[in-house]
Amino acid sequence: MGNFFEDLVHQVMDITMEDNDQMALKAKFHKLKREVIDDVRDIFPQGQITPPTLGIKGLRVNLPPKNPNDRSGPDLPNSSTKSAIPEVMRIFSTYVQNELPTYLIYVPDKRLVGRNEVKQMFRKEVALITEEAIHSRLVDLRESCPTAEREDAIRDIVKDTLKFAVLSHRWLDTGEPTFSDILKSFRPYGYEKLVKFCEKANEFGCRLAWSDTCCINKDSSTELEEAIRSMFKWYRDAYVCIAYLADSTSVDDLHEDVWFTRGWTLQELLAPWRMKFYVRNWEPLTSNLNDKENLEVMGVLSRATRIPLDDLRHFQPGIRNVHEKMMWASTRTTTRIEDVAYSLIGIFDVSMMVAYGEGKRAFYRLMEAIILKCDQWQIFAWAGPSSSDSPAFPESPRGYRPLNPVDSNDALLPSTVWRGDRNIVMTKRGLQIQVFLVDLSQQEVTVYEKIDTDDVQTDAYSNYSAGVVDYWCYDTSGDGILQPEQEHLCVLLRPDPRNPYAGWHKVTTPNLVTIRTKSKLRRTLTSVWL
C-alpha cells in the first residue's frame, strides 16, 4: 500500500508540476520518509507493531537496514536513548533548539538539515556520554574557571559533539547558492566555493557547517529575523570561522582585500574565537590552526581595520566604547541600506526588530537601542548629515570622526569625578541631555574645527551657542566645569526664531567642533532636547 501511494504521488506530480517544483517537493517527501523511518525504528526496533496472530487489526513494518557507515544515527552496540543520562538529553535538546542555527549543512553529503533532524542524527551519540566523561570535563573546566558547574561540563561536551564551522566571505554578484538551490540540489556557479568550504570544515572535524548564502530561508520573515539577530552568536559559538579572501594571495596584500570593506564581515572578524584564513584558490594563509593566534597576521589586520589587537583576538560585545566601534564600521558598506544597522546588532549586543524596507531609519532605531544602555559623551563625536528621525543622531556610522586621546591627567582623577551627562534619555521631545552652555559671541572660549587630523581655529560659529558634552563634574551640585587649555567637544545650538518656547536646536556641521578656554569655567548645567 505504501509503495502504491508513493507511486501515485509521483505520477500526479509528473502530470501537474514543473521539474524544479517536483524536485523540491520530492526532496521534502523523502526527508519526511527518512524521519518517519528513524522514529519507527527507535520505537519498534524489531519492525513489528502488533502480531497478526492475535487476531487484532495491526500491521507489520519491514524497515530497510541501516547503512553501517552512516554516522548520522547508527545503531550503536549496547546503546539506547533509554539508558542515557536525562540531564544530558535535556541539555542536548535545549542546545539544539535554542543555540544552533535554524538550518545547517550536513558536511558528508552537503544537504540542508533542520534542528529536528540534527537532534535525530546525533541523539544516540549524545546518549553515550558517561558520568566519567562529565567528571573529567568538569575537572578540566575548573582549571580555568573555578566556578564551573556540572551543567557547564555537559554543555561543553554536547557542543563538542555538534561542533560546526561557519563561512565568512564576500558574496559574488551572481551565482551564490541559495536556500532553494540546496533544497533542489541545484548547483550554481558559486557552488564550488561551498564545496571547498565543506572540505575545510571536514578537516577541522566538523560534520555540520553554516553559510549565510544558503542556510537562511529568506522567504520566511521570521526565520530571516532570527538569523540576523542571532548571527553574531552563531559566529561566536562556531568551532571555527573559515574566512575566504578571494582577492588576496599572501599576508602582504591582505589589507587590499574587498573583504575588509564589507559591513557584515566586521562581526565575522570580531565574533569567532578561532579563525582560519584562506586566500586565492583556497590556499591557507598560515600553518596555524587558529590564525587569531598568529600575531603577524593579527598585526596586519589591526593596521588594515584600525581595530586594536586585543579587540581582534578577544572582542567582547556591548555598548562600551560606542564611538570607537562606530569608527570601525564607518568605512564599510552593505548592499541593503538597512544592513548598515543590522550588521551591528550583535557587536553592540542590543535588540531591535528587523524590517527591510525602512531604509536609513534602521540606523536611527539602532542608535535608540544603544542610547538606552549608553552613558558615554563620545557618542556625540560625529558630524555631517543627521538622521531624518532625530538631529541627535547621524544618518550612518560614516558620520563618526576621530577624537584626540583623552587628556593624560584624567587617569589621576578620583573615581568620584565623572565627565559628561550620565543620564541621557530619549523622550517625546527628543534626546534629553545636560550640557555646559557657552555663548560663542562672548569670546570667552576659542573655537576649533577638527579637519582630518588638524584642529583649525575658526570664528564661523560665533552666532551660535556651544553645548559642551564632555564637561567635568566633581560633585552632585548640578554644576559643570571646563578645565583651562583642555579640548572640549560640543554640539552647536541655536534657538528657534519662529518658536522661542521650543528650546534649542542642534546645528549640523561638516566637522567636529571643539572649544578651549584659558581659565576655569564653572556654571549650572542646562537641559536641552535634541
Image (spheres, rainbow, N blue to C red):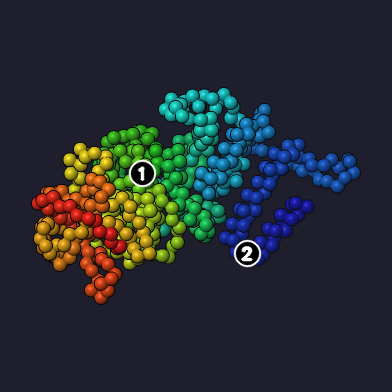
Q: Is residue 21 visible?
A: yes
Q: Is residue 65 left or right of residue 517?
A: right
**Residue most extreme to the front:** 477
Q: Quadrant of residue 77?
A: top right
Q: Nearer the viewer, residue 4 or 499?
A: 499
Report the amino acid beneath label 1: Leu
Residue found 12% across the figure and 53% down from its top? 517
Give the SS element for disc 2.
Answer: loop
Query: Residue 514, how many percent across, how many down?
Result: 17, 55
Query: Residue 123, how many percent across, how many down?
Result: 61, 37
Q: Nearer the viewer, residue 267 or 246?
A: 267
Residue hosting label 1: 270
Residue hosting label 2: 17
Query: Residue 114, how many percent across, how many down?
Result: 56, 48
Report the amino acid beneath label 2: Met
Query: Residue 447, how many percent across, how many down?
Result: 13, 58
